[in-house]
Amino acid sequence: MTGKVRTILALAAAATLIGGSVHTFAAEPTTKDLMEQIQQLQSKVQELEKKQDQQPQISRSADQDRAIADVLKDAQQRSQWLQNDTMMSNYQSGKFTLRDETGNFLLHPWFQFQPRYVTNFRENAPGGGDDTQGGFELRRMKFGFDGNAFTPNLTYLFNWATNRKTGNPDLEEAWVRYQLADEWAVQGGQIKDPLAHESMNSSKYFMAADRSYPVDLFTGGDNYVQGISLIYTAGPWHAYGAFTDGARNNFNQNFQDFPTNNANFGVAGRVEYKLMGDWGDYTKFNPIGLKRDLLVTGAGADYTQAGDTGFLLHTVDAQYMLTTGWSFYGAYLARAIQDGPVSSGAPAPAGFDGYDWSLEGQVGYLIDKWEPFVRYTYTNFDSAEFPAGAENVVHEITVGVNYFWHGESAKFTLDLTYLPNGAPQTDDGSGILVNSGDNEVLMRMQFQLLL
């Protein structure tokens, strides 16, 4: 066999090995397998080259030399890429992350899916007669990503929510936070107003299918605002201060004041004190994975001005969770209104001053994968907000059970809510419809998938 033929066969063998390496990379992209194949490739090419060099009577062409050099160069580049892998993927604790080896860049994509079936029965509904409404809805379909960029001190979160009535994605939350020092951080963008614990916590970690009636009405549920906040964290203390566009669902709006937008401005603050436990467990209401008993108390206030009307929202709350499975939550939430009305209720006399207040208590008990729970809220609206004789007191009694297939990542919730006095204002996000003074019963079945 001539040297020329052997050279051609060597190149063919090298090309075959490279093709096999690429195929293996696509099928089984493990660093160990690829390194072994690259080492085999280098050894075979070097062996073929050595044999060729031992036959001086046959000279290689310049094209053959370049082809072998390209093969060796490609093998060397693949080896360096594998040995100096700059991006690493990881799936741990229900999260998939992509990060560099230094930890300066991290990306965590995620989505939340909450399909829900709702049935609502109202006795003597508006318009006369009893009324039953029922059907399916995609209560929440959210997607986004969070992480850090350039340094672990610069974190971010961007989140879109699909409108359950139109199917259109809307920007819900978008912020950047920088850790100025061990105890101080600044955050800006579209954020949650630092007021009520139940609003600040994500809908991923509720005990019932949704937030309570007074929280939805007084704060707007998630209570997203546009603004900037200063955050202080030291030992058992958390404190927040914020300057915003106001706490009346004032998000995805431009810089203009009321009445173009919902408010002129808002200032808010909240203080939390941890008596025991870990701060990471304070972001949820279920004791899933709880390692230490948790007890945290908090208080917050927000003043928002809309035109000539001022709102002072204020709250005091406490959360207690035990490793035995018990969980407790209680809150007082109120709002003082000056020079109303700027209200979603019925028209009230111009210039009225009012005070709405509520009490909430919630108890749950985790038994393996099951969690029965009960929640009660009492809401007293100022009578000046509604026509004379309208019911202004709301009792919300909810009982239900959660089943956790895979913790909060795959969860089923069934609950029943009874409102013996009905509700003077609609909260269709939780399934409550207006029905002043008569019985209202609500049933919700919901599945949650988190990835």
Image (spheres, grey):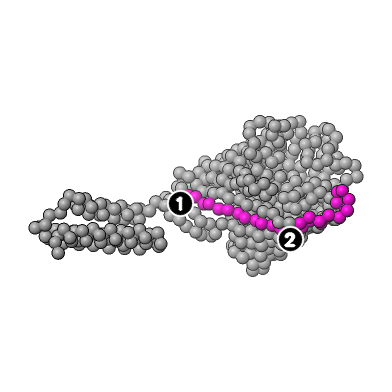
Residue at position x 43%, y 54% in the image: 88
Location of mark 2 (residue): 415
Q: Nearer the viewer, residue 192 or 325?
A: 192
Res 210 → quadrant: bottom right
List x then y, in percent, for residue 386.
85, 42
Magenta span: 106-134
Question: Which amino acid does the dot numbered 2 rest on?
Answer: Asp
In the displayed orientation, state which residue is furthest to the bottom. 368
Q: Work out which residue is located at the far right of the displayed protein and give it.
A: 389
Q: Quadrant of residue 402?
A: bottom right
Comparing 121 with 15, the one in front is: 15
Q: Which numbered mark, 2 or 1, is in the foreground of this view?
A: 2
Q: Secondary structure at mark 2?
A: strand
40 left or right of 185 in image:
left
Q: Amino acid at mark 1?
A: Arg
State the mark number for residue 445: none
Residue 188 among those drawn in magenta: no
* Left or right: where 131 falls relative to 325: right
Quadrant of the image containing the N terminus:
bottom left
Q: Position of residue 102 (x, y in %)?
A: 42, 50
Residue at label 1?
99
